[in-house]
Amino acid sequence: MLEQSRWALLPSPPLPYIGETKSAVNLKYTGCSYDPNSHSFFVIWGLMEAERGGKRYLLAEYDPATMKLRHTLLFSSEFFGTVAAGGRQIRKDAAGTIWVATYANMIRLFPNQLFIPESAPGMVKQAGGIAQAGDGNLWVASNGNGMVGFDGVSLAEQPKGLSKTATFVTSGYADKSGNVYFSSSVPYQGILKFDGKNHWENLVGNKNVLGYYITNDKKGQLLWGTMNNGLWILPKGKLGKDTSDWLKINKAKGLELDNVLTALEDRYGRYWMGRLSQGIAMFDPKQNKVVNWLRTQDPKHFGCMSMAEDARGNLWFGTDKGLCFFENRPGIAPDFDLNAAMQLVGLDFTGQLPVASCILYDANTLIFGNEAGFYLLDLAAFYESPSGVLVRSFNEMNGYQAGAVGQNSFFIDRDSCLWMTANGGVARFDPGALPPDLAMPQVLLDSLVADGRVFRDFSKPIKLAGERFIQIYFHSPPNPLLNDNIRFEYRLSGDSTWISVPPSDESITVSLDDLTGT
């Protein structure tokens, strides 16, 4: 058995910095625990920070055979207390979740997630856009409180000279030179371009143009979705300070969207745009005109507030009714029925909630978010069997604490971690730290109820006579990863249609008109 005194002599582990700025933080050893199930030894250090009252901690996981550091996790807790080290036990479950038990409390930690609440000292309120500067530090722009930097450990104030009351929308972008861009929600402010250190400038800051969304197209050109002025494109070589520098897809081109909340360039060089309350539009440079699919034209048309293109060139739209798949194609004519070509995906997991953010994480993973949390969609499984959608949900049960995901607030950093702003603060998610869910779902039939009788023996045919309704009870053993990622469907012999079972139900009521027989 490993002695605690041996581990207390270990040198302090490195803090999980992501940027060049190194905060001066001292560590104090507080305790350790060996977990025989995961074959890991955990050591906890307290961060000596007067401004936080000593409520932040660093948990380090070691290989007990080699003493090699496996992983570190920064967390804060009001409940960790000052209980003696011997009163703590630390265990890691099959999902990679870490449980810390003290004499008075139980704390559950999620190594694949980090949450910075609005209440954290130095954090801005109403976090909006987020992007990573050239030095590796993250910058979060807010709606009314300027910006704040984050180096992986501590928050840092914005440079002097930048307004602390500046307001920005929920969208951020970083170019290859390390500059970050945030779109202002105040007239005559335009786009803030900031190098992450001490140099910044405003693009289109001398005009009364407001923007909602900022990204880049396949050519590396800046895209800016605006209010009442369409989609603006900044060609390479142009500075972007004057409106004449920008190409514009607007009413002159036939655009009928008042505001552009999201946009992308597809594999055919066409620009797609969306607004949740209005619909979807597409500009074809070859035709030099826009095709509009507005809800005022047809109430069945989809509103759209986020979108992404996958590795196959197909499009995913975050709509007012949920996530939609569109198999992209060339030669879309003005009379093309987009609504008929859209396929809602994953509603068993998400419901018909508007999808605020959507991003392609890698060739096989699409990540999207709504007011309930965020989701990982397995694209490889979708293309293999579109009806058998594989979705992993992240909500309060899975450790997600940030609240409703912000509009187009996703950003992937250089370490392949996903960042997002939400109504409760800022969250980071590391898909690489997520154990694969390899558990095979099982369905066990418990009983069948018909005509007031309960049947539990299914080894022989059951004789029914004239019953109109039968109720079937079943259950599924819990997922060892504690994920709420299994949904059920059923169909009757001879039927081609599968019927979804609500997520919380473990029974099926089947209507069988004039059924007689087995």
Image (spheres, rainbow, N blue to C red):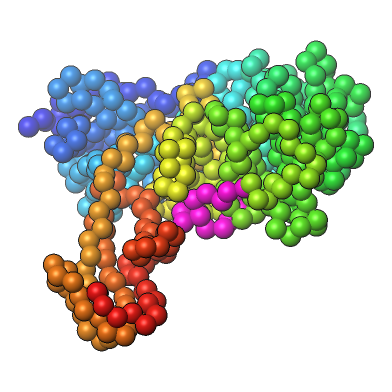
Instruction: Tell me if I can see residue 23 in this picture.
Output: no
Residue at the left extreme of this rendering? 1
Is 345 included in the stretch rendered in magenta? Answer: yes
Is 234 included in the stretch rendered in magenta? Answer: no
- Tell me what residue is drawn at x 39 percent, y 80 percent: 513
In the rendered image, which quarter is residue 463 located in? bottom left
**Picture mark count:** 0
* Quadrant that contains the N terminus: top left
Asked whether 505 or 7 is in front, the reply is 505
Judge whether 396 appears above or below 504 on screen.
above
Asked whether 466 or 246 is in front, the reply is 466
Q: Position of residue 115 (x, y in %)?
A: 47, 42
Please state if 144 lies on the left or on the right of 413 as rendered.
right
Instruction: Tell me if I can see residue 329 in this picture.
Output: yes
Q: Which residues are magenta?
A: 342-356
Please state if 281 lies on the left or on the right of 450 as rendered.
right
Residue at the top extreme of this rendering? 237
* Quadrant that contains the C terminus: bottom left
Judge whether 497 appears above or below 99 on screen.
below
Please state if 115 lies on the left or on the right of 225 as rendered.
left
- Tell me what residue is drawn at x 27 percent, y 66 percent: 474
- Tell me what residue is drawn at x 51 percent, y 37 percent: 366
- Tell me what residue is drawn at x 32 percent, y 67 percent: 506
Please state if 130 lies on the left or on the right of 15 as rendered.
right
Q: Position of residue 444 (x, y in %)?
A: 22, 61
